[in-house]
Image (cartoon, helix red, strand yellow):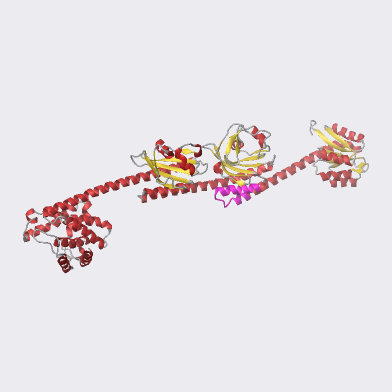
């Protein structure tokens, strides 16, 4: 015992001289004594209740009060200090009994020289006992912490969603200690921002999207979370208000859940949080977040609470990391799925409206928007037109148009950059009134750019304050790029369709011109080419020919006699019968048609009629003598129509036949010249017509 530290002694002794002798003996042996003598039971009890002592000395024989009774009263107080009997005469049996009842030692008054040694030994033994108890308690606490960590680990074993992990950690901590507010935050090293991930206060879980991020304060007087992140150690504030008075910045949580930067409260104001613990969450040695518990009571936690929360934070870190990785993976998969769906829509559809609807569906699903829209800007125009909208309560925007100088979308298109408005209600512009009536708060507008040109504007709306992080902004930009590509592809396809239509019209007009030129040269009835073409198409449709083949039948019908351009005029325009040699020359016109048209890829599928319309069902035709179904169907159809029109039209060498006579002729030669099935359908067709 150091002489500089007083030994506080309560001495139960009725003889002042005996007490002074005992104290003198102690002071002679390097003890500095601060002592008080009492002689009665009431004084003794009062001193035990009101004083703090390192040692109790007690005489055994007192008037109306014995040392044994004093010892019993002492043991009821559970004071952890030595109790030594100092008596004039104490038999061996009494000495043993006092030791059994809890006395540390006994010393006879005639042997006071033993007293310093007995006191020193008693103090040392008490110190050793206290250390053993402390060590045992520490081991017990460590075991409890380990058991708590193991139990939490088991509880978190099946948790896969980050929200579930946070909920389980919160419930487990609340079962171990009194918690009024529980918060889990994450720290982003790239942005140096602390984000609230789970907040429980006022007996409810709060919406963390309303909590803006808090910047890391690296100064010595930074906020508690910043200090926990920087030091990587648990921090306990028994008096949270006193700790905040030294902080440069205090972030307060309002009743609506908003976090604001304010000055610390003055002493007369009563804060809700009176004590708090901040424990870092570590991943691979780096602090990635903070668990904080708060109490409305001053000194509401103990050091044991700090230690056990630190132990649980190690388990929580692994579960949070796993859930975060799973959540990030799922989020990336959902993004890829969304992009794939849009790619499929772009590839599979030429209808831009379908693609835009699918894109807005993905935006609404993955960004949790309350509403979204796409307005398109046609080429060489200064008007935006809403083409697709989702989530709006009214039809105000549907297919509405406005100038580029009007509204938020016009501003996005003109400035060609993302516009984010955190609170639309703070704007006083006429163009946003439809959005105000929809009760929108947050606005994002993105230009749809393709090849440096604005194709339109993508807008998303929230009916509460909301801020997209960089990851989701990048995803939104990707969606906007895909939308621009879809619009550009559709415009290109429409332009290609129109060009192809114009080219096809030019081709067909040319073919019709050739047909008319042939009519004039061959001196056929004006309109023969048009009539046989139209009738052939109608008969082919009646026979169930697919629409994709009709266009080729039309062209073949128009060009059925194109080969006659190679026949000399003296034969082609001869008024009388042809000689056998002239007939052979005339029959060459189908071969000429094949030779001229087959190199033209555009007309290859139209060759059946010009080349084969003089083949007969019985094989007696030319040029190849094909028979029955060897003859292409288009040629079989056309041959009936061509003969019908020729018989029922005036020619230079004869008058037109009556329809009845022409029908009889065709009916008679069915199965010889003509396909019988085609004839049957044709006769019904003529009858109906």
- Residue 80 seen by the camera: yes
Q: Nearer the viewer, residue 159 or 547?
A: 547
Q: Is residue 504 above or below residue 57?
A: below
Q: Nearer the viewer, residue 689 or 178?
A: 689
Residue 623, percent from left and from top? 14, 60
Question: Magenta segment, which residues?
Answer: 151-174
Looking at the image, residue 129 sits to the left or right of residue 20; the answer is: left
Question: Based on the displayed image, in which of its 4 quarters is residue 613 positioned?
Answer: bottom left
- The residue at the point 85 percent across, 37 percent down is 10
Looking at the image, residue 210 sits to the left or right of residue 524; the answer is: right
Q: Residue furthest top?
A: 4
- The residue at the point 23 percent across, 49 percent down is 505
Question: Based on the displayed image, in which of its 4 quarters is residue 260 positioned?
Answer: top right
Determine if the magenta segment contains residue 157.
yes
Q: Nearer the viewer, residue 309 or 209?
A: 209
- The residue at the point 38 percent across, 49 percent down is 353
- What secondary structure is the magenta-colored segment mainly? helix
Question: Based on the displayed image, in which of its 4 quarters is residue 231 positioned?
Answer: top right
Split into 4 quadrants, where in the image is the C terminus? bottom left
Residue 336, percent from left and from top? 44, 48
Residue 679, percent from left and from top? 20, 66
Q: Is residue 639 above or below residue 102?
A: below
- Residue 471 seen by the camera: no
- The residue at the point 56 percent across, 43 percent down is 208
């Amino acid at each position: 015992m150091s002489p500089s530290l007083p030994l506080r002694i309560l001495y139960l002794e009725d003889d002042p001289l005996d007490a002074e002798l005992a104290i003198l003996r102690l002071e002679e042996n390097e003890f500095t004594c601060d002592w008080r003598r009492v002689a009665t039971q009431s004084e003794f009890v009062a001193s035990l209740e009101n004083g703090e002592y390192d040692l109790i000395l007690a005489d055994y024989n007192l008037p109306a009060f014995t040392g044994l009774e004093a010892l019993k009263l002492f043991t009821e107080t559970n004071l952890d200090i030595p109790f030594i009997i100092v008596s004039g005469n104490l038999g061996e049996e009494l000495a043993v009994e006092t030791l059994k009842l809890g006395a540390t030692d006994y010393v006879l008054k005639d042997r006071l020289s033993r007293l310093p040694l007995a006191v020193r030994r008693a103090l040392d033994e008490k110190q050793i006992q206290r250390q053993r108890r402390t060590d045992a308690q520490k081991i017990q606490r460590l075991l409890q912490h380990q058991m708590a960590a193991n139990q939490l680990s088991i509880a978190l074993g099946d948790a896969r969603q980050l929200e579930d992990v946070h909920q389980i950690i919160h419930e487990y901590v609340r079962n171990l200690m009194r918690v009024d507010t529980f918060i889990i935050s994450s720290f982003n090293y790239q942005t140096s921002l602390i984000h609230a991930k789970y907040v429980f206060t006022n007996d409810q879980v709060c919406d963390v999207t309303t909590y803006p991020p808090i910047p890391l304060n690296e100064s010595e007087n930074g906020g508690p979370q910043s200090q926990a992140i920087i030091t990587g150690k648990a921090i306990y504030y028994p008096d949270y208000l006193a700790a905040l008075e030294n902080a440069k910045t205090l972030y307060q949580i309002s009743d609506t859940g908003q976090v604001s930067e304010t000055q610390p409260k003055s002493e007369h104001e009563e804060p809700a949080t009176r004590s708090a613990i901040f424990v870092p969450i570590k991943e691979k040695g780096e602090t990635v977040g903070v668990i904080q518990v708060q109490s409305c009571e001053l000194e509401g936690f103990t050091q044991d609470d700090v230690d056990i929360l630190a132990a649980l934070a190690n388990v929580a870190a692994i579960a949070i990391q796993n859930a975060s990785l799973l959540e990030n993976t799922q989020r990336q998969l959902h993004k890829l799925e969304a992009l794939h769906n849009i790619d499929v829509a772009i590839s599979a559809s030429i209808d831009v409206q379908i693609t835009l609807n699918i894109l807005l569906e993905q935006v609404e699903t993955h960004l949790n928007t309350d509403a979204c829209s796409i307005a398109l800007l046609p080429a060489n125009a200064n008007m935006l037109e809403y083409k697709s909208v989702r989530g709006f309560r009214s039809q105000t925007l549907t297919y509405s148009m406005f100038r580029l100088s009007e509204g938020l979308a016009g501003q996005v298109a003109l400035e060609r950059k993302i516009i984010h408005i955190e609170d639309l209600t703070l704007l006083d512009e006429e163009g946003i009134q439809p959005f105000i009536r929809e009760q929108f708060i947050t606005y994002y507008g993105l230009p749809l750019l393709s090849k440096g040109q604005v194709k339109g504007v993508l807008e998303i709306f929230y009916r509460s304050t909301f801020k997209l992080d960089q990851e989701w902004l990048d995803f939104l930009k990707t969606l906007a790029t895909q939308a621009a590509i879809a619009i550009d592809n559709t415009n290109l396809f429409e332009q290609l369709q129109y060009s192809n239509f114009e080219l096809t019209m030019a081709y067909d007009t040319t073919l019709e011109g050739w047909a008319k030129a042939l009519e004039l040269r061959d001196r056929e009835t004006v309109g023969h080419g048009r009539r046989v073409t139209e009738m052939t198409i109608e008969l082919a449709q009646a026979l169930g020919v697919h629409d994709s083949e009709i266009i080729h039948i039309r062209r073949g019908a128009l060009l059925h006699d194109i080969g006659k351009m190679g026949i000399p005029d003296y034969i082609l325009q001869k008024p009388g019968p042809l000689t056998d040699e002239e007939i052979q020359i005339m029959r060459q016109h189908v071969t000429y048609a094949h030779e001229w048209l087959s190199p033209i890829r555009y007309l290859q599928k139209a060759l059946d009629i010009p080349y084969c319309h003089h083949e007969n069902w019985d094989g007696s035709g030319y040029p190849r003598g094909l028979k029955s179904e060897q003859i292409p169907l288009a040629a079989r159809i056309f041959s009936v129509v061509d003969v019908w029109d020729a018989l029922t039209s005036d020619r230079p060498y004869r008058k037109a036949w009556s329809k009845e006579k022409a029908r009889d002729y065709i009916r008679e030669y069915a199965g010889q010249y003509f396909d019988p099935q085609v004839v049957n359908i044709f006769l019904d067709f003529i009858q109906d017509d």
